[in-house]
Amino acid sequence: MNLAGPLYALLAFALYATHDVIIKFLGGTYSPFQLIFFSTLFSFPLVTFMLMKDATAGHLRPVHPWWTALRTVLASITGFTAFYAFSVLPLAQTYVLLFASPLLITLLSIPMLGERVGIHRLGAVVVGLIGVLVVLRPGATDLTLGHLAGITSAVCNALASVIVRKIGRDERPVVLMLYPMASNFVLMGILLAFVYKPMPIEHLGGLGVISALGFVAGLVLIAAYKNGEAAIVAPMQYSQIIWASVFGFFIFGESLETATMVGAGIIIFSGLYIVFREARLGADSQTPVLRTRSRGATAASFRISPILRRSRPHEPAE
């Protein structure tokens, strides 16, 4: 087996986890609107330079304007709610809620993509959603805005991913990548007027590091999928729970709750089952989860799937 793919993926998700630590650190002081605005601002040059290599003929008008508009709104909500969840919840708990996204992609692929999802994958989804309930423990603990934000981020990321899967064959990568960034820049810039706090240079530098980590992690994840099978690379995302546990304990003094770890185990098992089930079905499945290769919930980064699709035109990876 070629180990380059999964090793690249482990490195990419370690970078993403470090990216999230800085979000949590700064989120204790600043509004998510402010964090997203400046991290998006710093990301623009990096992504623009990368897109300058795109020789695809065309313009910036979307082929599917309404789907693109809906996906843009969902991507903005995904980023904002994820930033807020990271700011107020323990890192491990936030990741567990965000890990529900592949389960939701499986469900949404039925009405939106016409995917046939059998009893095995539907059963895995039900088990995974039970894992979410184990983490939330409704009735036994208070559900906060942070929990609602984490769930909202997972739902909106799943919807946005399925939409990109639906329209990705027709839209240029530059359209898929720049519209959400432009939306974040404009919308968060307007909201910034109501929440802005002056930032010392080291905190501005931290936002620059968030942008750089998101960009580099995206490039490393692209390398992972180019050097490894999706069925092996995709499960590496769950390594983030390990980083969350380590960073949360040593940096933020967070303890690991039993319910969080049990729920994480259930959700991860369900997600792995869906991934391996799709890999086994191969051509008999549209594999909506395996082909959703971008790491969601990061407003400061870019979706890698359009870049993979450009480099592999025969494969509509989203």
Image (tube, rainbow, N blue to C red):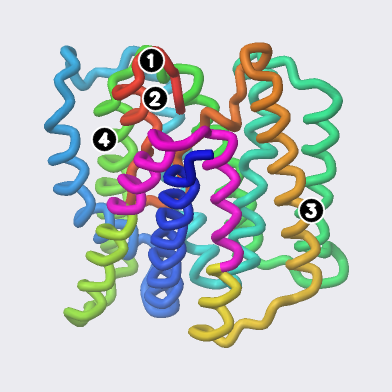
- For marks 2 and 3 on the same chain, the one whose residue lies earlier in the sequence: 2
User: Is residue 196 found left or right of 31 in the rendered image?
Assistant: left
Mark seen at residue 269 = none
Q: Quadrant of the N terminus?
A: top right
Disc 2 vs disc 4: which is toward the camera? Answer: 4
* Residue 110 sits in quarter: top right
- For marks 4 and 3 on the same chain, the one whose residue lies earlier in the sequence: 4
Label 2 residue SS: helix
Tell me the CA gap for discs 2 and 4: 11 Å
Q: Residue at x 45, y 72 (%)?
A: 24
* Residue 105 sits in quarter: top right
Residue 161 in view here: yes
User: Is residue 102 found left or right of 227 in the rendered image?
Assistant: right
Give, as a three-letter code, the residue at label 2.
Thr
In the image, 308 versus 195, the foreground residue is 308
Label 1 residue SS: loop
Residue 192, relative to residue 103: is it above or below?
Answer: below
- Say which residue label 1 marks: 64
Disc 2 vs disc 3: which is toward the camera? Answer: 3
Tell me the CA gap for discs 4 and 3: 36 Å
In the image, 21 versus 189, the foreground residue is 21
- For marks 2 and 4 on the same chain, the one whose residue lies earlier in the sequence: 2
- Say which residue label 2 marks: 68
On whether residue 287 falls in the magenta region, the answer is no
Most frequent secondary structure within the magenta stretch: helix
Residue 311 image offset from top left, x and y in percent: 30, 24
Residue 198 image offset from top left, x and y in percent: 22, 78
* Pointers 4 and 3 in contact (C-beta within 8 Å): no
| Residue stretch rendered in magenta on the structure | 215-242
Tell me the CA gap for discs 2 and 3: 34 Å
Few, some or many C-alpha atoms within 10 Å of disc 4 (few <14, some 14-19, many ≥20)? Answer: some
- Say which residue label 3 marks: 266
